[in-house]
Image: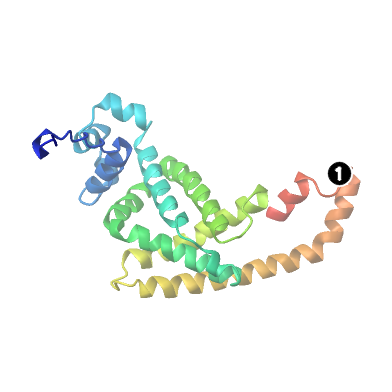
Amino acid sequence: MAKSPSAEIIPPSKPADPRGKIVEALLELLSHSRWNDIGLADIAARADVSLAELRGLFPSKGAILAGFLRQVDLEVLDHDVKDMAQEPARERLFDVLMRRFEALAPHREALRAVRDGLRTDPMGAAALNQVAVSSMQWMLAAAGIPEAGPLGLARAQGLLLVLARVFDTFLNDPEEGLARTMKALDEELRRAEKVARVADDVGRITAPFRDAFDRVLGRGKGGRDDDAAAAA
């Protein structure tokens, strides 16, 4: 005898990801409150979790914001970029960074509150810079540009500066397709490309002097010192 529909066992639904709920709660609060006015208790109440659970998942408010940036990283990295493999590095970076801006677009008011709040919180800004540089290393990797070592770290910090120069345009871009952001990003990447070329030229010109200096100090070629000098 077949079971009636009412007799079927319905599996329980999976509980919502508490980390995601907490990140979403912070973003919702930031959409109408200042960064410095939001406390941990406010976030816990909005996410419907206890302070103990919040503490177990995130050590600080800044860590919750870092969790949001990680979500954005994952959304960007989830795209297939194989079709861009033959494009110049600048075009690949443009494609990756525009996908990042598109992922950030729904949260512009929250990001505006973060920007304004961190202007008066240098320690928080320094901590966020470390997280953002790490994100930029992932963006470089997505664009097929080496991100490892001191030179890769310097590239990531430079890329973060590019984004910072475009950020205000992005926050105030009225176009649904982010046309103004695209224009500003293209200009900044072209400017950065010119600076990189000048740096490469200077590096080639000064290479004999660096080699002589290394010999005086007894340093060999090809080690970490060379990478550090190149990054500088």
| Amino acid type at mark 1 | Arg
Q: Position of residue 63 (x, y in %)?
A: 39, 38
Q: Would you say 212 lies left or right of 21 here?
A: right
Q: Would you say 60 lies left or right of 87 here?
A: left
- Name the residue beneath numbered marker 1: 219
Q: Name above or below for residue 99 compared with residue 227.
A: below
Residue drawn where x is 24% and y is 41% of the image: 37
Q: Residue furthest front?
A: 1
Residue drawn where x is 77% and y is 46% of the image: 225
Residue drawn where x is 50% and y is 44% of the image: 130
Q: Between residues 5 and 46, which one lies in front from this camera angle?
A: 5
Colour approach in the figure: rainbow
Q: Between residues 169 and 17, which one lies in front from this camera angle?
A: 17
Kindly tell me whether residue 192 is visible in this rendering: no
Q: Between residues 97 and 77, which one lies in front from this camera angle?
A: 77
Kindly tell me whether residue 84 is visible in this rendering: yes
Q: Quarter of the image holding residue 62?
A: top left
Q: Name above or below for residue 11 compared with residue 200.
A: above
Residue count near mark 1 (Cα–Cα under 10 Å), binned few <14, some 14–19, many ≥20: some
Q: Residue furthest top?
A: 52
In the rendered image, which quarter contains the N terminus?
top left
